[in-house]
Amino acid sequence: MSGGGANGSDSKVETISRLAQWKIESFGPCSYRRSDAFKLGIWNWFLSVEKNRYMYIRLFPEPCRISKEQPPMARFVLRVSNPGPGRRPYISPVHERLLRTSDDFVWPIDSTFHGRFIIDVEFLDLKISPLNGGDPYSIWPNESMMQSLASKSTLRCLSRMLEEGIHSDVTINTSNGVLKAHKAVLSASSPVFESMFLHDLKEKESSIIDIEDMSLESCSALLNYIYGTIKQDEFWKHRLSLLGAANKYDIADLKECCEESLLEDINSSNVLERLHEAWLYQLSKLKKGCMMYLFDFGKIYDVRDEINSFFRHADRELMLEMFQEVLTVWKPV
């Protein structure tokens, strides 16, 4: 709460939650009064009132670096009332304004308020603009913030479940080690896993999944993705193994994520491998990217030593597509 100031004891503004209240004890027919600064949100504020023919009420932030660089977008309602019985208050419409100076908001009231009266300001919302640009966002918890907090809390719980093996109920055998996981989480992430535990298959009976085409490390990366705890470097290191697992277990979002990542760093040393992966897993965007790299950009000459080996093992339909791409790029003008 704010203290007294140069205008006397009645310059103090009391605040609670999102409400600010200024009790003015004495106000003449031709007067000007400004409140002490009061804190609400991340800004200091002032109220001022001026009486001439009309009463003019202003609300503005204290001039400072933050109000200059990140001025508040305020949505608020004002209420002016006498403390005595029987006097109807003046209530403003809902205002929404970007407030920088005392000229940005003025509310005129045609009234005979004098002597003692009260000004209430109820802030319905306060938004701030990011320093690097973008849309203003509320400084108070809103739906998106609650969703973000809930998501973080869920990820923390899932991380603990995986790392500490809390109530784990399925064992995964990899090519070089064993991992523990949870049937419910695996089933929610993959229709293939869900089918294992839904129907009378050996995995349902034994609570054991054999994933022997993945190493312990790469399968751990798969679980970290499913549980939402994977790190960027871990994903980058194991993305080819993750792509195979995403295709095998029908994890569509992981498959798409791997394809986008593999598109980002095509070069002469990996383009043929990427093209094979794109054909094997039916990744149209990755296949197109590899074809463009080889033929539109002429990098086929950089891999001529490897191309013979590639053709010996490549699918005939893929070889036909590559031949058709050559004819398209090098057709006579």
Image (cartoon, rainbow, N blue to C red):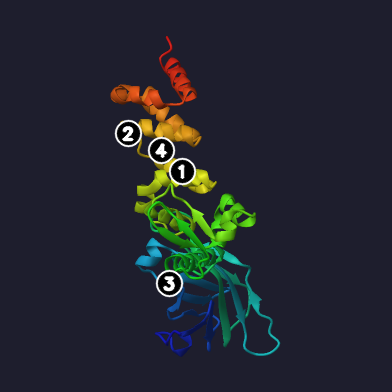
Mark 1 highlights which residue? 244
- Mark 3 touching mark 1, by CB under 8 A? no
Say which mark, if any, is on residue 43: 3
Which badge, 3 or 1, is on the more N-terminal residue? 3
Mark 4 highlights which residue? 263
Q: Amino acid at mark 4?
A: Leu
Say which mark, if any, is on residue 267: 2
Look at 43% across and 72% down and name the residue there: 42
- Is residue 257 at all visible to an observer of this figure? no
Q: CA distance from mark 3 to mark 1?
A: 53 Å
Label 2: few (<14), some (14–19) or many (≥20) C-alpha neighbours in 10 Å: some
Q: Is residue 208 left or right of residue 82?
A: left
Which badge, 4 or 1, is on the more N-terminal residue? 1
Residue 190 position, x and y percent, is 56, 52
Q: Is residue 232 left or right of residue 26?
A: left
Which badge, 4 or 3, is on the more N-terminal residue? 3
Is 152 above or below relative to 115?
above
Q: CA distance from mark 4 to mark 1?
A: 16 Å
Q: Amino acid at mark 1?
A: Gly
